Image (cartoon, rainbow, N blue to C red):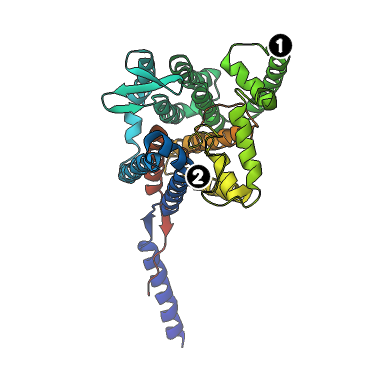
Amino acid sequence: MAKATEKRVSGRKRTTSRTRAVQRRGDYYDFSLVAVIVLLICFGLIMLYSTSAYTATIQFNDDMHYFKRQAAISAGCLLAALVFSRLDYHLLEKVWFLLYVSSMGLMMLVKSPLGFASHGAKRWLALGPVQFQPAEIAKIAVIVTLSYMVVHTRDSLRSLSSTMKMAGLGGAQALVAYVFTDNLSTALIILGITAGLIFLAHPKTRIFILLFVAVIIFAVILVLFLNSTLETSDSFRVRRVLVWLHPEDYAKGDGYQTLQALYAIGSGGFFGRGLGNSIQKLGSVPEAQNDFIFSIICEELGIFGGIVLLLVFAYLLYRLFFIAQNAPDMFGSFLVSGIFIHIALQVVLNIAVVVNLLPNTGVTLPFISYGGTSVLFLMAEMGIALSVARQIRFKEPTRII
């Protein structure tokens, strides 16, 4: 009896030790992130066609003009992102300086003969057959550069000089984006990414709370000043603030688009008019397929459809948060954190503008608004996030039968 018991115990010990011996670190690939990206792209294409078919028919005699271009770019960029995800994201550590300098140089070229204007703003660059907004590259460049700086100066982040160095790198990109591409919205997003990454890396949070309160107070004072003294200003940015405060006073001018977007949201009710049944897209909301596509979504699918879309974006951000939390190293974690901050900022800013919580900024809705440049660099960021996710390792015991 004693020998049998001893044999069973020793057998369990051998099984346990054998289980530990074959315990492995399993590869991980975030198929959930891929699925939510594909879902957003498909939904965006459906809404893009619904929103732009009437305008495309009038302008190009082809109701699928915008749809076909966006679908081709989205499909190509998605495949490129999946291929890029197979590369080691640590390669970005070796080219961070080249990426940083190149992005600034490309933005400066906008003021050269290579730059051209579209929709009243000179923000585009034409290099042969390729046309793009170089300010979009600056967002990725700031994310990569500051992630590199965090990793290599983490022990000295308590010092003011290291913090100011990181702030200076982000601020320089924002300044170039504003001066050479006249793109204040992109400059603000770059500053937001910079502040977010410094906040995550810095050991103290009290100073950031004080700075945030100071910015809010300054913004309130500025708005009150503009409202009371600059009603006749010729600055289009000042007019945007005035339109935001009193859109009904500018109903026939700068406030027309904002009011029509609000009408679209209000007329949609909770469940909407039905897919394809929007009235405001028939010319009432200018360029509805771009910055104000969310208003048409709410008109056709209602507030319910808008909430569902926000939940999908929330899940996308959750997947990025998960990857950042489980990244194999600090560089990967901050890369994905920067992407998280960028997408969150764009979603919040775009929807806040559409519902008139903020002045018009010209920020697109990620994966939904029409624009090849936006999709291209968003998918580049998704490729980076998937590359980081692919190197996550989880210890999983193998069951032995």
Compared to residue 398, the image places residue 66 above or below, namely above
| View extreme (bottom): residue | 1
Left or right of 222? Residue 4 is left
For the question of whether residue 238 can be seen, the reply is: yes
Q: Amino acid at mark 1?
A: Thr
For the C terminus, the image quarter is bottom left
First in sequence: mark 1 vs mark 2: 1
As drawn, 112 above or below 20: above
Is residue 7 positioned above or below 128 on the image? below
Q: Nearer the viewer, mark 1 or mark 2?
A: 1
Secondary structure, mark 2, is: helix
Say which quarter of the image contains residue 292. top right
x, y percent for residue 387 = 37, 43
Q: Secondary structure at mark 1?
A: helix
Q: Which residue is at a point 71% across and 17% down the rendered structure image?
A: 227
Kind of residue at badge 2 = Gln
Check disc 2: other Cα within 10 Å, few if <14, some if 14-19, many if 20+.
some
Q: Is residue 245 left or right of residue 61?
A: right
Task: Give the camera-side residue of 28 and 118.
Answer: 118
Left or right placement of residue 267 versus residue 300 in this view: right
Residue topped by disc 2? 325
Whole-percent x and y of residue 384? 38, 40
Residue 76 at x, y percent in the picture: 32, 43
Say which mark, if any, is on residue 383. Answer: none
Give the tally of numbered discs.
Answer: 2
Q: Quadrant of residue 213?
A: top right
The residue tagged 1 is 229
> Callout 1: 10 Å neighbours few (<14), some, many (20+)?
few
Q: Please provide percent x and percent y for residue 380.
A: 37, 37
Q: Confirm whether residue 367 shows in the render.
A: no
